[in-house]
């Protein structure tokens, strides 16, 4: 189960509304490499993970990603609050506004609604962890691109925090992959799937 | 920054240290240095949250002091400028 804490993981204090920036940052909510896909990817993958340290990692990183969903949503909320109809029209935000007003809806920057097709839960520890390491790097690249597009120091500060977390998660998933491989036959990691085959590796599945 | 915001900032700081240690300990469960750091920050965090609950209100709904009514919905939400 989960329990809500009434605070952001890292402060978001954007003083200047900027509908154009919101339309870019929204990709990290509901886009292909966004925080919602990250959270659902790890929280779905954890059930078939046979190694408890890595199950813990998927649970805990999946939970932190929910806090990142909240930070991105807080940025979108603050970037679009108190916009005039004139600003909404001029910034191109009218296309979002017509369907959602100022409600927060998970979609990519190009307007594609969030889909579970953005992530995989393969039921194979090596495959899943390799996907997760790629996902963290893809999110890091997206944050690099957002930093290239952003001017407001209040926006950049929160984005830099989120970018840094991708790097830490990449490191931890790499260690998770090493733990999986340490339990498998070093001559052939792919001889069996420890999440499916019985008596596969040093710590067979429970 | 007022005293309430400073205390909340301290809680966030301790929570960040704890989260970072949590992820590290997941893949290094026998690291005694990390376990000691975890104990240290857990203690600091618990004390700060207790003080926050007494002076300003709940961080989680179950920390609401019901003698004062349902304060959980009185305080601003964290994405609102007043609540951050």
Image (tube, helix red, strand yellow):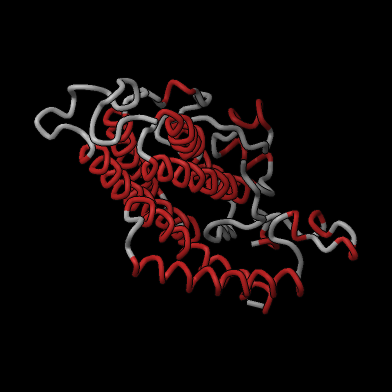
The reply to whether residue A109 is in sight is no
Q: Nearer the viewer, residue A69 or A14?
A: A69
Q: Nearer the viewer, residue B29 or A104?
A: B29
- Quadrant into which the C terminus of chain B falls: bottom right
x and y percentages locating residue B8 in the rendered image: 62, 69
- Quadrant into which the N terminus of chain B falls: bottom right
State which quadrant residue B59 falls in.
bottom right
Q: Residue at x 32, y 25 (%)?
A: A124
The reply, left or right, for residue A11 in relation to residue A4 is left
The reply, left or right, for residue B74 in relation to residue A141 is right
The reply to whether residue B75 is in sight is yes
Q: Residue furthest left?
A: A187
The reply, left or right, for residue A50 in relation to residue A93 is left
Q: Residue furthest bottom?
A: B3
Q: Nearer the viewer, residue A166 or B51?
A: B51
The reply, left or right, for residue B60 in relation to residue A68 is right
x and y percentages locating residue A202 in the rendered image: 24, 35
Q: Residue at x 31, y 22 (%)?
A: A198
Q: Residue at x 66, y 60 (%)?
A: B81
Q: Residue at x 32, y 63 (%)?
A: B31
Q: Nearer the viewer, residue A81 or A113?
A: A113
């Amino acid at each position: 189960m989960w329990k809500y804490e009434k605070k952001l993981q890292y402060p978001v204090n954007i003083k200047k509304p900027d509908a154009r920036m919101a339309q870019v940052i929204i990709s990290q909510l509901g886009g292909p490499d966004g925080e919602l896909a990250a959270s659902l990817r790890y929280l779905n993958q954890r059930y078939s993970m046979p190694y408890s340290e890595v199950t813990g990692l998927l649970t805990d990183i999946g939970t932190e990603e929910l806090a990142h969903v909240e930070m991105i949503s807080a940025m979108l909320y603050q970037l679009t609050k108190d916009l005039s109809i004139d600003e909404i029209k001029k910034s191109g935000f009218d296309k979002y506004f017509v369907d959602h007003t100022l409600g927060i809806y998970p979609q990519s920057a190009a307007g594609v609604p969030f889909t579970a097709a953005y992530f995989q839960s393969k039921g194979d520890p090596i495959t899943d962890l390799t996907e997760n390491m790629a996902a963290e790097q893809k999110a890091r690249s997206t944050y690099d691109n957002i930093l290239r597009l952003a001017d407001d120091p209040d926006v950049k500060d929160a984005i830099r925090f989120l970018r840094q977390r991708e790097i830490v998660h990449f490191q931890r998933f790499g260690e998770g992959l090493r733990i999986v491989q340490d339990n498998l036959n070093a001559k052939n990691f792919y001889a069996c799937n420890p999440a499916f085959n019985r008596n596969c590796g040093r710590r067979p599945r429970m | 920054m007022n005293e309430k915001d400073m205390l909340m900032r301290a809680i966030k700081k301790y929570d960040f240290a704890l989260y970072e240690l949590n992820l590290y300990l997941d893949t290094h469960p026998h690291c005694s240095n990390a376990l000691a750091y975890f104990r240290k920050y857990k203690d600091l965090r618990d004390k700060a949250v207790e003080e926050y609950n007494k002076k300003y209100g709940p961080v989680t709904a179950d920390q609401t002091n019901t003698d004062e009514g349902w304060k959980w919905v009185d305080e601003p939400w964290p994405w609102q400028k007043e609540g951050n």
